[in-house]
Image (cartoon, helix red, strand yellow):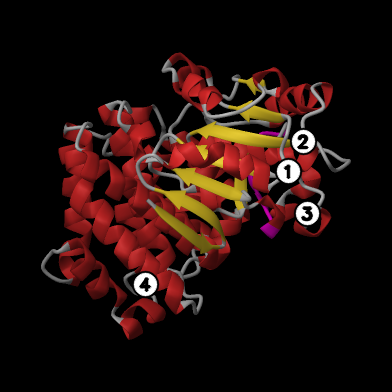
Amino acid sequence: MSLISYITQIHFGYGSVDKLQDECDRLSIKRPLIVTDAGVRLAGIVDVILQKLNNPTNIGVFDKTPPNPNEHVIRDAVQVYRAGKHDGIIAVGGGSSIDLAKGVAVCSQHDGPLRSFALIEDGASRITAATAPVIAVPTTAGTGSEVGRGAILILDDGRKVGIISPHVVPKSAICDPALTVKLPPMLTAATGMDAIAHCIETFLSPSFNPPADGIALDGLRRGWANIEQATHDGNDLNARLNMMSASMQGALAFQKGLGCVHSLSHSLGGINPQLHHGTLNAIFLPAVVEFNRTASTVIQEDKLSRLAQAMAIDGANAVIPALEQMIKRLGLPTGLKQLGVTESQFEKIIDGALADHSHKTNPREASRDDYSKMLASSI
């Protein structure tokens, strides 16, 4: 088990969940609210968390996190937080639960609707150190939200936006791969491709951040080498550990920015909140990497060749075919049609993608026509 301090404090490894009470004590959290979802609670993971904590009478549980958290649910959770006089949050679950917890941490301590804190509404400056402390305990290996500075949430008006600030980063992340062992195969695959997408897209982002690039490449190496084994044999402890590391590393790295994969998946996820974010990222990844092949920053630094090296495949030209083949081998949907998405939705998807914060950090600026071509390639 390791203690890592990079962006936030991370307890990583099997048995690290035992550090939960120590982290509550360090952060002076005496009345935590556990934010989770019904599936995680049904799986018995909330019971495991409760066993690690003292004074159970002071602990509240909010288990109504939806697949894509929205402003309405945040209001409900804030009401529970305030009514219970809680002083911190323990987020237990995948990215949805952790992002919901971040939204509650902000909105419970600041006045104004959720949209006033959205990055695209210039809301970052409105988020202060008064934000409630969050301890994140991921139960999936994909989003890396446990170490991220943002939360992706759906506003009342239907926009899926980023709430981004250094104050949103969880004060502590407890990454115990044992909590992912019971994750179903298709969810393992979809969340795993989310982690891989993070590592690839942040590495391709043109911002100068060599440490983030190194973390992304190592995360990609671990994720690519272990995603199939973790999917097909969920009890493989080494594969689970490496997938959780890939997830964490992807999010540590994407502080430098993402790109069109995420601007598209954020937009489409806002239009249809039932669609899984990681699955959308997997579908969009080949088309976006192809679009970015002609970006000068990618060519000058030969980034595709470095991706290929991390993936242990034969050169830059093999990257896109390898991605397409991996998605098929994992049994994930290979096109948007399989998810019920139609061409009639393209214009609305493009509107959202152009407004998304990830659009601005893609290595090549995408026009409306470019997005239309990427969607057509992904249909």
**Image point 72% across, 49% down: which residue?**
118
Using residue 173 as the reference point, say whether residue 306 is left or right of it: left
Q: CA distance from mark 2 to mark 4?
A: 37 Å
Q: CA distance from mark 2 to mark 1?
A: 8 Å
Question: Disc 3 marks which amino acid?
Answer: Gly
| Disc ID at residue 87 | 2
| Disc ID at residue 214 | 4
Q: Residue furthest left?
A: 314
| Disc ID at residue 123 | 3
Using residue 91 as the reference point, say whether residue 239 is left or right of it: left
Q: CA distance from mark 3 to mark 4?
A: 30 Å
Q: Position of residue 5 (x, y in %)?
A: 52, 62
Q: Are marks 3 and 4 in contact (CB under 8 Å)?
A: no
Q: Are marks 2 and 3 in contact (CB under 8 Å)?
A: no
Helix, strand or loop at disc 3?
loop
Name the one closer to the observer, 175 or 1.
1
Magenta residue span: 157-166
Disc 3 packing (10 Å; few <14; some 14–19; many ≥20): some
